[in-house]
Image (spheres, coloured by chain):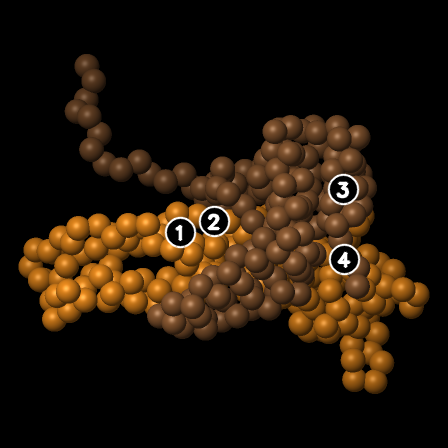
Chain colours: A brown, B orange
């Protein structure tokens, strides 16, 4: 005979085994929208502008915020809003081909030159996409890069 | 990797704040509590917007009102095996430290290719192979995160540059 129904909450899955190697185990971040470094840069900029316009809330001054702000400013491969959107459009086509959101953002942040480099840096891409398709997308992204 | 995640936070409000301004106090409290906080697995960089503030509930026995707030935030969470770029913050004789946003990653000597040797020229210590690769304070490197240890309020990570396509970035 079945016991009384359980009223307690489910125990959360043990964390600590999340990884982004050949297998992608993102825990509670599975299927959460990701941002590449350039997109994060854009978003922080627009949040700051919005706060300025409303004049209500002073922009955050926490250590984490300031360090991240500096980091994305330095490592954003596309500094300009227009190109960031273009890159976003190009990489969105990857999602239809079976690439996950995590890999999409990784590719847009790291900007590898060749398909082989991309698959070494992001090993979970290995059997999700073939080299030719990936190479075509990478070529398009690198055309938009600004090396100045 | 940066994520846009919907999170929840429970806030208790003292009875002296009850009134028309209550929701402003709640928002202030939310931004003060959560922005820039580190849960041990992820860092909340900035709050984008607040979705919903629940109806308050009075906590029996204390008089405080309890609000559940759900909000969207930019979250930074590192994963084991992820490749990231970072800025070298200091070099010591058995490795170097890299700042990746708010996370400090240590790359030990065993995780550095053997051709990069520790050298001290003048006052600036560096790892260099004497030709074109140099890691010193202020250089940008690409590394793979090998392990993360999180505690409430802080995170530590170790990284590796001993693989193909990793190491100092050409500038």
The answer to which image quadrant residue A132 occupies is top right
- Structural distance between the alpha carbons of marks 3 and 2: 26 Å
From the image, state whether disc 3 or disc 2 is nearer to you. 3
**What is the secondary structure assignment of the residue under circle 3?**
helix
In this view of the protein, which residue sits in the foreground, B164 or B170? Answer: B170
Do marks 3 and 2 both belong to one polypeptide chain? no
In this view of the protein, which residue sits in the foreground, A136 or B61? Answer: A136
What is the x, y in percent for residue B53? 25, 52
Q: Is residue B117 visible?
A: no
**What is the secondary structure assignment of the residue under circle 2?**
strand
Residue density around tag 2, few if under 14, some if 14–19, many if 20 or more, within 10 Å? many
Name the quarter where the C terminus of chain A is drawn: bottom right
Name the quarter where the N terminus of chain A is drawn: top left
Q: Residue furthest right?
A: B131
Q: Which residue is mark 2?
A: B4
Q: Which residue is mark 4?
A: A146
Instruction: Kindly identify which numbered label has been placed on residue A140.
Output: 3
Q: Residue furthest top?
A: A1
Q: Are marks 2 and 1 in contact (CB under 8 Å)?
A: yes
Do marks 3 and 4 both belong to one polypeptide chain? yes
Q: Of marks 2 and 1, which one's residue comes earlier in the chain?
A: 2
Q: Which residue is mark 1?
A: B72
Indicate the chain on which mark 3 is placed: A
From the image, state whether disc 1 or disc 3 is nearer to you. 3
Indicate the chain on which mark 2 is placed: B
């Amino acid at each position: 005979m079945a016991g009384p129904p359980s009223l307690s909450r489910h125990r959360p899955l043990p964390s600590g085994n999340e990884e982004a190697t050949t297998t992608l185990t993102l825990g509670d971040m599975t299927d959460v929208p990701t941002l590449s470094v350039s997109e994060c840069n854009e978003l922080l900029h627009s949040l700051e502008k919005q706060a300025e316009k409303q004049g209500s809330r002073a922009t955050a001054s926490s250590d984490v915020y300031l360090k991240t702000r500096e980091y994305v400013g330095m490592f954003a491969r596309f500094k300009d809003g227009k190109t960031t959107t273009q890159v976003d459009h190009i990489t969105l086509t990857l999602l239809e081909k079976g690439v996950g959101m995590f890999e999409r953002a990784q590719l847009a942040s790291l900007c590898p030159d060749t398909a082989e480099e991309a698959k070494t840096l992001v090993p979970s891409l290995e059997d999700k996409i073939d080299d030719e398709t990936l190479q075509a997308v990478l070529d398009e992204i690198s055309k938009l890069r600004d090396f100045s | 990797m940066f994520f846009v995640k919907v999170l929840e936070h429970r806030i208790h409000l003292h009875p002296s704040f009850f009134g028309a301004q209550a929701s402003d106090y709640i928002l202030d409290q939310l931004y003060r509590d959560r922005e820039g906080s580190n849960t041990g697995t992820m860092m909340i960089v900035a709050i984008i917007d607040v979705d919903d503030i629940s109806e308050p509930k009075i906590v029996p026995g204390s008089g405080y009102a309890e609000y559940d707030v759900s909000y969207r935030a930019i979250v930074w969470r590192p994963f084991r095996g992820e490749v990231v770029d970072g800025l070298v913050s200091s070099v010591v004789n058995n490795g170097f430290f890299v700042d990746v946003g708010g996370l400090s990653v240590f790359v030990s000597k065993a995780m550095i290719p053997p051709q990069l040797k520790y050298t001290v020229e003048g006052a600036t210590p560096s790892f260099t192979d004497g030709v074109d690769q140099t890691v010193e304070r202020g250089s940008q490197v690409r590394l793979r995160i090998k392990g993360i240890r999180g505690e409430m309020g802080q995170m530590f990570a170790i990284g590796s540059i001993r693989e193909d396509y990793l190491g100092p970035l050409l500038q």
